[in-house]
Image (cartoon, helix red, strand yellow):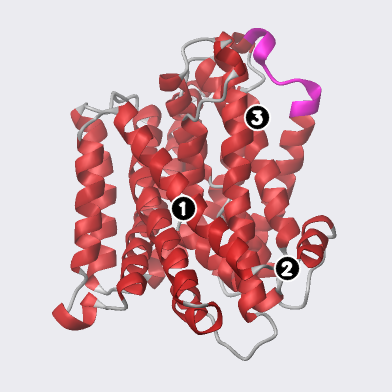
């Protein structure tokens, strides 16, 4: 009977991680600029995420390994091992530090939109960002996986209710919604938005986070049915949130002479069209998205680096804490100082453009190793994994040329 029930678990952390301010902003701009036309990209993203995260769950639950550890153990050649570790380390560290600033800033924008205030203008820097960083610090410092997991699940529930309620409140055109989901199209100028939608959903550091958290949460191969149910509920829930945001922006702003540059504009501009309740729902959703990602990004970085460097992966260990503290501190500094970290974000774009297909290749390779026994990849799982890798390689090439100003 126990295995017939759904228990939310590590996949909820994955949802919390990829539904951050970056995803909210990308989804908002996609809806405002292209209506429902790019929803198919979100559908692909959700399917690709489930394919990869199911592999990381098997790695953690059955193989009892974290992805960082598995990558480190794959190489017998010392030079190749060092090169791969340096590449992943640099991308994870710099990329997550940049995105952490966006996560904290996004949560701060949600609060400012809710109260119609901007503390940066009053005091010169954002005390809310510092307060959000402090909340994340206290929660992570407890070193309690169960407490952190419950807090994340609560934030995901709040985020889901807020964004889906705003979707229902605005009443989008369902025929256009399903057409956008099921009939792929690429309007002029939409390529980079498609890259953004997929790139903010299929996130490389989530592969490290999920393998490590699945290993902690589940105890044996007998738990794989529950782990899969967790994935097949939590990841589509994240996709549903993204669809709700795109649809809200499409209904409110597509084809109208209203300039929308990001999620905060959606929260503030929606009030004259649909009332104060809609604004509050979007502001609450943005806050929950920001603070949940602000917790998961440092956590994922600690898991990734600890596995790669063969450090202690216990949440209470000193080395584990030092890593997430560094990422959290960098994020608070970026978010509270008013800096526009253009160069850091540029590097993060380049790093993730390189990192995602490489990590996916490592993962696919790992999932065909003998120690997984009958739980190693089947032919169908390998084909699906290869399709995801090929698509991410194409998108990464496009993303990299964009980052270097070559488009």
**Residue at image mark 1:** 159
- Main SS, magenta region, reads helix
CA gap, disc 2 and disc 1: 21 Å
Residue 380 on the magenta span: yes
Residue 289 visible in image: yes
Q: Please name which of the two marks, 1 or 3, marks the residue nearer to the observer.
A: 1
Residue 377 on the magenta span: yes
CA gap, disc 1 and disc 3: 32 Å
Q: Nearer the viewer, residue 219 or 244?
A: 244
**Residue at image mark 3:** 364
Q: Earlier in the sequence, mark 2 or mark 1?
A: 2
Task: Give the x, y percent position of residue 106.
Answer: 38, 64
CA gap, disc 3 and disc 2: 33 Å
Outermost residue on the left side: it is 123
Q: Please name which of the two marks, 3 or 2, marks the residue nearer to the observer.
A: 2
- Could you tell whether 297 is left or right of 83 in the image? left
Task: Give the x, y percent position of residue 50.
Answer: 64, 37
Q: In the rendered image, which quarter contains the N terminus?
A: top right
Start and end of the magenta stretch? 373-381
Q: Nearer the viewer, residue 315 or 247?
A: 247
Residue 368 figure quarter: top right
Task: Give the x, y percent position of residue 243.
Answer: 64, 58
Outermost residue on the right side: it is 183
For the point 63% across and 55% down, the residue is 198
**Residue at image mark 2:** 36
């Amino acid at each position: 009977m126990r295995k017939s029930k759904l228990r939310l678990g590590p996949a909820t952390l994955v949802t919390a991680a990829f539904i951050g301010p970056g995803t909210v902003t990308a989804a908002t701009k996609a809806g405002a600029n292209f209506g429902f036309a790019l929803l198919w990209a979100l559908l692909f993203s959700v399917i690709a995420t489930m394919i990869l995260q199911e592999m990381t769950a098997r790695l953690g639950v059955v193989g009892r390994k974290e992805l960082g550890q598995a990558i480190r153990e794959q190489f017998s050649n010392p030079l190749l091992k060092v090169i791969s570790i340096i590449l992943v380390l640099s991308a994870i560290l710099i990329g997550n530090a940049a995105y952490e600033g966006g996560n904290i800033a996004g949560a701060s924008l949600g609060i400012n939109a809710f109260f119609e205030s901007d503390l940066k203008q009053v005091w010169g820097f954002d005390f809310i960002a510092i307060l959000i960083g402090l909340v994340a610090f206290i929660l992570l410092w407890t070193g309690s996986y169960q407490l952190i997991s419950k807090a994340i699940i609560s934030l995901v529930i709040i985020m889901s209710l807020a964004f889906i309620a705003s979707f229902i409140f605005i009443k989008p055109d369902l025929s256009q919604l399903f057409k956008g989901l099921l009939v792929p199209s690429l309007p002029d100028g939409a390529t980079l938005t498609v890259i953004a939608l997929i790139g903010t959903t299929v996130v490389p550091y989530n592969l490290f986070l999920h393998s490590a958290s699945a290993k902690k949460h589940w105890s044996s191969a007998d738990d794989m049915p529950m782990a899969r149910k967790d994935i097949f509920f939590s990841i589509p829930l994240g996709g549903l949130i993204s669809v709700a945001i795109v649809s809200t922006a499409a209904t409110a702003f597509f084809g109208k002479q209203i300039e929308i540059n990001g999620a905060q504009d959606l929260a503030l501009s929606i009030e004259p069209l649909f009332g104060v309740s809609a604004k509050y729902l979007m502001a609450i959703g943005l806050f929950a998205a920001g603070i949940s990602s602000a917790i998961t990004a440092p956590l994922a970085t600690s898991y990734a680096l600890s596995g790669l460097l063969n450090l202690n992966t216990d949440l209470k260990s000193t080395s584990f804490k030092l890593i997430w503290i560094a990422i959290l501190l960098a994020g608070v500094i970026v978010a509270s100082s008013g800096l526009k970290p253009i160069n850091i974000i540029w590097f993060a774009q380049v790093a993730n453009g390189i990192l995602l297909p490489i990590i996916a290749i490592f993962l696919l390779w790992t999932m065909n190793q003998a120690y997984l026994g009958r739980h190693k990849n089947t032919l169908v799982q390998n084909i699906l994994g290869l399709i995801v890798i090929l698509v991410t390689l194409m998108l990464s090439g496009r993303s990299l040329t964009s980052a270097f100003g070559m488009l």
